[in-house]
Amino acid sequence: MALKKRNKEDVEIPSSSLADIAFLLLIFFLVATTIDVDKGLDLVLPPMKSEEVKINPKNITNLLINDEGNVLLDNKPVEVRDISDIIREKLQKNDKLIVSLKTTRGTKYEVYIKVLDQLKRAGATRISIAEPEET
Amino acid sequence: MAVKIQRKSELKIGIPTASMPDIIFQLLIFFMVTTVLRQYSGLKVELPDAKMVEKLPTKRHVSTIWVDEKGRVVIDDVTVKKLDELRLIAYNKLAQDPMLVISLKVDKKADMGTVTDVQQELRKANTLRINYSAIPAG
């Protein structure tokens, strides 16, 4: 019997697991990539050497945050979460109110952002970051 | 003679899934290409939460400053060793792009001392528009 050679040898590499490998890689990338946070609280810093504009003390509210995260609003201790209501009331009485925010060097950034967030929730637009005291 | 034609349909023709790997590769290559668009890696920081967050107006006129909890400061691709350098760097960036907005990515545990110093340098450089990056919450 003449050995018939199969002229067409169709030997394919089994590609059934290609999809699995591709899925694995895809899931790896989906999980490993971090999407940059593009959102945040806007602020405009006060320009340097601004002429000391004499502002009527009635139109300023002073906020001071110390190292422990306690907040003094016009020298009265307040809770962070009450700030937005208090400021909103003050704004209703005086819409030209300027809020001056001062921190100490040991204040935690998280508290500062919480307070700033409260001010924005109250709708304060004239937020001024006070120059730190030279200690 | 009525012959009941019984068609045992053994031939179950399913949807051809032979092209699935191709589709998956497409998606994969898409992700591989679109997610490695970040130019600078910056520092690893844990951002605080805030509710009243606003989106940065554009992605182009933005320089990012990272401050981690140890007080290290990085602006775009430059590690700042002395804060005095920051003023010049920010000033040059502003000169190239007057519409510059600085995105501050500060770790929530960082001390305000470093942040205040950075802000002072930014004020000296006249780059006054800043945006404190925060995760939307609340």
Image (cartoon, coloured by chain):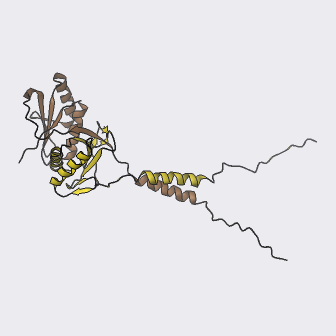
Q: Does the image show residue A19?
A: yes
Residue A131 vs A83, above or below: the answer is below
> In the image, is B8 to the left or to the right of A126?
right
Asked whether B55 or B125 is in front, the reply is B125
Asked whether B120 or B5 is in front, the reply is B120
Question: Can you give x and y, in whole percent of width and height, for residue A69 in the image?
Answer: 16, 43
> In the image, is A28 to the left or to the right of B109?
right
Residue A34 vs A83, above or below: the answer is below
Question: Can you give x and y, in whole percent of width and height, for residue A19 in the image?
Answer: 56, 56
Q: Residue at x 7, y 44 (%)?
A: A133
The N terminus of chain B: image quadrant = top right
| Occupied quadrant, residue B44 | bottom left
The furthest residue to the left: A135
Which chain comes out brown in the rendered image? A
Which chain comes out yellow in the rendered image? B
The C terminus of chain B: image quadrant = top left
Asked whether B94 or A1 is in front, the reply is B94
The furthest residue to the front: B96
Image mark count: 0
Question: Can you give x and y, in whole percent of width and height, for residue B40 in the image?
Answer: 32, 54
